[in-house]
Image: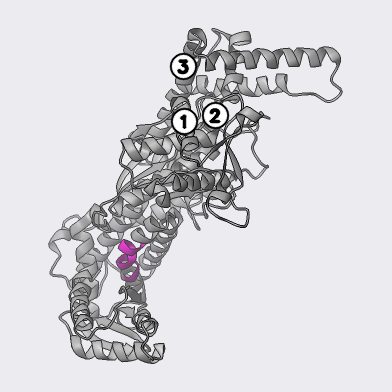
């Protein structure tokens, strides 16, 4: 919050260290927890360690303290700082309490939805997510992928990175061909009408086809022959697709569009807007050219003449003695590609056509080794962005009654879950707030219903599996989306009672009174929002923002119950508290927006 002060102090520190040939390490400022006053602190331990490494005979702790004390004397007491101290190698700056509170609240009220936004980083990031296979239907597991990717995209964009949202649906493969086969042979022309009905129907066809193509226990010779005939038909259909058969390609494109229309409708509902669409089928041929280049460079080995495949022994090429990446196949003996091959081609498009500096892959944890192999091959290939490729893995979503399975048809479709959430919120709203108009109630249902689903996915560590429980997600108590949204609603209700007093005109209401612990806790959390944005963006962890939003909401609920705004001791204190309420409301809205959740005015 006090960047200007620390920048000016850093300039003095840099000048001193340059003049005295002190090898200054990067200064990292950390907030000092409130204990009667606010402050920020930086350490000189690394600077002392640098001196020790350069050959000087120094004891690092003692030298760090000596540097801190010298710097303290050098900078004096800068404007806006109440006192400076040097303690155990740290330089601690303390702010005038009333000034600190005023600066925090004023910054929020002035910057509004831009509060916490970082300065441009000068790097372009592509976040790849929301990419279920086509010829299926969007289920609750896909939703976790989509909301995780969208929240991350919002965070890195808000922190200052130029951000491109990209989807890479798997639109070809044996699973897709399986749906084409059963549709062509048993259901041609029978597809239902309706965006979601048609998409969901394709999933049902996949389940039915899987049963027809899976070996049964105690299978008769006749059943085996029928199953093998079906499989032969399916593989022949795949061969025709691979050869570019016009009829098969048109059938594939038509049915693929049914899936994409459903997917895009769901993404629109979730306020997710992709900037780029890549398809697995589009990079199939380009990936084969990449294999030829890798062979020519000596990175890949062509063992097809001996009946093998095109392989890359990554561990050997990297000079690793212990197995880490294993030997990877890039091209089968029959010349067909694999997922790994096509991921290399997609990376080339990202880096060359889109000028991406960082590429974040939001893909489930099962693909962790696969993506690490892809990144390693990119490094061997000499792609500079390979070092900034990152896999954001996430665990599975299951239900209280057990795991899901597409093959067995045990899937919970997102549309069904969302519709049920909206229905429940609508019914609860009729009881709690019967005076809402139908339009307002519909907006509340969408905001709270979808917000509860989003928060349920983002509030747990992305790498862990999670059990989705509708009753828990929709609760107004505890670690939930509605609990946080309700804090925003409570702030809005206080401000509505003072509509005659424009908060923007209360800038002369200072915080020079004895603040309660609840007010201090709120200001402390509000001041940390910009740092939390940076932390969540730099670590690629939306859960950091989800936890922060909960902490802020909890602090505001406590303030709401314990501190009187309406009946404050004086008008000046009332006005200062109104400004604090407005600042809390704005920051809650900003935090929720970064999670892909809207902040309602009523519930």
Work out how far the residue at label 3 is from the one at label 2, CA to CA, in angstroms: 20 Å
Up/down of 76 relative to 539, above or below = below
Q: Which residue is mark 1?
A: 287
Label total for image? 3
Q: Does any portion of residue 199 appear in the rendered image?
A: yes
**Crowdedness of circle 1 by 10 Å Cα count: few (<14), some, many (20+)?**
many
Mark 3 or mark 2, which has the lower sequence index? 3
- SS of the residue at dot 2? loop
Range of magenta residues: 524-532
Q: Which residue is mark 2?
A: 337
Q: In this figure, which colouring scheme has been used for the structure?
A: one colour
Q: Mark 2 touching mark 1, by CB under 8 A?
A: yes
In front of the other: 227 or 514 = 227
Question: Which quarter of the picture shows residue 28?
Answer: bottom left
Residue located 72% across and 12% down the image: 229
Kindly identify which numbered label has been placed on residue 253: 3
Decide if residue 402 is on the left or right side of residue 470: right
Residue located 19% across and 88% down the image: 74
- SS of the residue at dot 3? helix
**Residue 312 image offset from top left, x and y in percent:** 56, 41
Kindly identify which numbered label has been placed on residue 540: none
């Amino acid at each position: 919050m006090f960047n200007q002060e620390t920048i000016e102090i850093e300039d003095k520190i840099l000048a001193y260290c340059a003049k005295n040939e002190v090898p200054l390490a990067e200064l990292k400022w950390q907030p000092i927890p409130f204990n009667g006053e606010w402050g920020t602190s930086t350490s000189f331990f690394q600077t002392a360690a640098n001196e020790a490494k350069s050959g000087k005979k120094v004891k690092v702790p003692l030298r760090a303290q000596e540097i801190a004390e010298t710097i303290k004397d050098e900078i004096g007491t800068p404007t806006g700082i109440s006192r400076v101290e040097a303690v155990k190698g740290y330089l601690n700056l303390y702010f005038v309490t009333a000034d600190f509170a005023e600066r925090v609240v004023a910054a929020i009220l002035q910057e509004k939805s831009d509060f916490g936004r970082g300065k441009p980083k000068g790097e372009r990031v592509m976040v790849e997510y929301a990419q279920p296979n086509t010829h299926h239907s969007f289920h609750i597991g896909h939703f976790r992928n989509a909301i995780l990717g969208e929240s991350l995209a919002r965070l890195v964009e808000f922190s200052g990175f130029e951000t491109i949202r990209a989807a890479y649906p798997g639109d070809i493969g044996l699973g897709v061909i399986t749906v084409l086969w059963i549709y062509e042979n048993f259901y041609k022309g029978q597809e239902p009408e309706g965006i979601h009905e048609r998409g969901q129907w394709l999933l049902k066809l996949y389940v039915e086809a899987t049963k027809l193509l899976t070996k049964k226990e105690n299978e008769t010779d006749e059943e085996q022959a029928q199953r093998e005939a079906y499989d032969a038909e399916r593989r022949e259909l795949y061969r025709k697709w691979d050869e570019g058969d016009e009829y098969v390609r048109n059938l594939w494109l038509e049915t693929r569009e049914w899936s994409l229309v459903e997917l895009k409708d769901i993404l629109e509902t979730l306020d997710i807007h992709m900037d780029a669409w890549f398809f697995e089928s589009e990079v199939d041929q380009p990936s084969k050219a990449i294999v030829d280049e890798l062979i020519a460079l000596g990175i890949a080995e062509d063992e097809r003449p001996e009946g093998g495949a095109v392989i890359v022994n990554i561990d050997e090429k990297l000079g690793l003695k212990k197995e880490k990446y294993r030997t990877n196949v890039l091209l089968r003996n029959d010349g067909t590609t694999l997922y790994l091959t096509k991921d290399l081609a997609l990376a080339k498009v990202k880096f060359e056509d889109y000028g991406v500096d960082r590429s974040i892959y939001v893909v489930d944890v099962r693909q962790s080794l696969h993506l690490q192999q892809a990144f390693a091959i990119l490094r061997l290939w000499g792609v500079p962005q390979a070092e900034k490729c990152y896999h954001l893995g996430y665990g599975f979503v299951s239900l209280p009654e057990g795991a899901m399975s597409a093959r067995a048809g045990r899937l919970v479709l997102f549309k069904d879950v969302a519709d049920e959430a909206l229905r429940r919120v609508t019914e609860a709203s009729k009881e709690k707030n019967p005076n809402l108009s139908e339009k307002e109630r519909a907006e509340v249902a969408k905001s709270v219903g979808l917000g509860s689903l989003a928060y349920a996915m983002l509030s747990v560590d992305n790498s862990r599996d999670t059990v989705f429980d509708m009753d828990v997600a929709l609760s107004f108590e505890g670690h939930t989306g509605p609990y946080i949204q309700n804090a925003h609603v409570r702030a809005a209700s206080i401000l509505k009672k003072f509509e005659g007093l424009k908060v923007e005109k209360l800038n002369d209401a200072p915080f020079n009174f004895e603040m309660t612990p609840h007010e201090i806790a709120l200001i402390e959390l509000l001041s940390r929002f910009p740092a939390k944005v940076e932390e969540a963006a730099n670590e690629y962890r939306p859960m950091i923002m989800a936890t922060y939003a909960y902490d802020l909401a909890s602090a505001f609920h406590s303030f709401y119950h314990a501190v009187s705004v309406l009946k404050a001791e004086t008008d000046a204190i009332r006005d200062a508290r109104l400004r604090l309420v407005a600042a809390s409301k704005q920051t809650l809205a900003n935090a929720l927006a970064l999670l892909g959740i809207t902040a309602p005015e009523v519930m």
